[in-house]
Image (cartoon, rainbow, N blue to C red):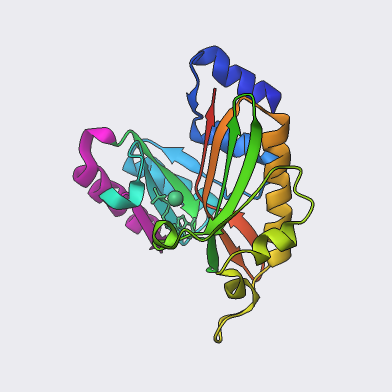
Amino acid sequence: ARQIVQAALKEHPDGGWLPPEATVSLLRCYGVNVTESVEAHDAEAAAEAASRVGLPAVLKAVGPVHKSDVGGVRLGLQTTDEVRQAYHDMSARIGQEMTGALVQRLAPGGVEIIVGGVNYPAFGPVVMVGMGGVLADLLADRAFRVPPITDPAAMLAELRCAPLLHGYRGSPAVAAEALQDQLVRIGQLLDDLPQVAELDLNPVIVSPDGALTVDARIRVL
Ligand code: ADP
Ligand code: MG
């Protein structure tokens, strides 16, 4: 993990957002469960990547900050032909700003959670967990801890959305203990690596099978 951070800072001494591959590698060093992502730079490569990661696939524009705001996320592409077509449509719609696309496998449905973290200079790390999805900013349902996180279950219980994890109105209970485990690991990462200025997992999809991050950003400084 330190090598990844140091290599990034050597290339960009003023820091910045890590490239997608380095982001995934750094998270995996800490056992954070992140979906496989293959970067493609044309429609043909995207179709090929989809057959590698598995169908149904997801296509996401690389370049724009809020991908879904500009039509830069396409979910549930069933065939490699659909992936090829989606790449063409997306690059036509977004234009110059799109430098390529990430291809992922469609994750099983579940509860969408945000996990965030910051390292304040001369103060240290804080981890945030909150409800994900489109209502996240509106409802501001969040809980905070200074790592090491020793009570992840209590942290989750502070959320008003906590009942969603335990099976709400006919929806199945999801793997809350897997999410707890991920929170502890993120705390450890931030505690170990003060160069990680900011980290944003949005969303972590928590299904009955586990907790899987499908979108992550890490800024080093
Ligand atoms: P952005 O944050 O730029 O809008 P995301 O990568 O978070 O883009 O994708 C937007 C939404 O699409 C997510 O909140 C999630 O609902 C869904 N999504 C993204 N990737 C996957 C995936 N691999 N499997 C299933 N759903 C996904
Ligand atoms: Mg996101």
Which x, y percent locates residue 3?
68, 21
- Residue at 49% from the left image edge and 30% from the top image edge: 19
Q: Which residues are magenta?
A: 71-97
Residue 24 appears in the rendering = yes
- Residue at 49% from the left image edge and 16% from the top image edge: 12
- Residue at 73% from the left image edge and 39% from the top image edge: 188
On screen, residue 190 above or below 71: above
Which x, y percent locates residue 24?
59, 39
Looking at the rendering, which quadrant does residue 193 occupy?
A: top right
Q: How many marks?
A: 0
On screen, residue 30 above or below 132: above
The reply to whether the magenta stretch includes residue 91 is yes
Q: Main secondary structure of the magenta part?
A: helix
Ligand 1 falls in quadrant:
bottom left
Residue 108 appears in the rendering = no
On screen, residue 84 above or below 221: below
Looking at the rendering, which quadrant does residue 211 occupy?
A: bottom right
Which of 59/124 is in front?
Answer: 124
The reply to whether the magenta stretch includes residue 129 is no
Which of 165/76 is in front?
Answer: 165
- Residue at 56% from the left image edge and 20% from the top image edge: 8
Which x, y percent locates residue 108?
55, 66
Left or right, residue 127 beside residue 49: right
Left or right, residue 34 beside residue 49: right
Q: Quadrant of the N terminus?
A: top right
Q: Quadrant of the C terminus?
A: top right
Which of 187/143 is in front?
Answer: 143
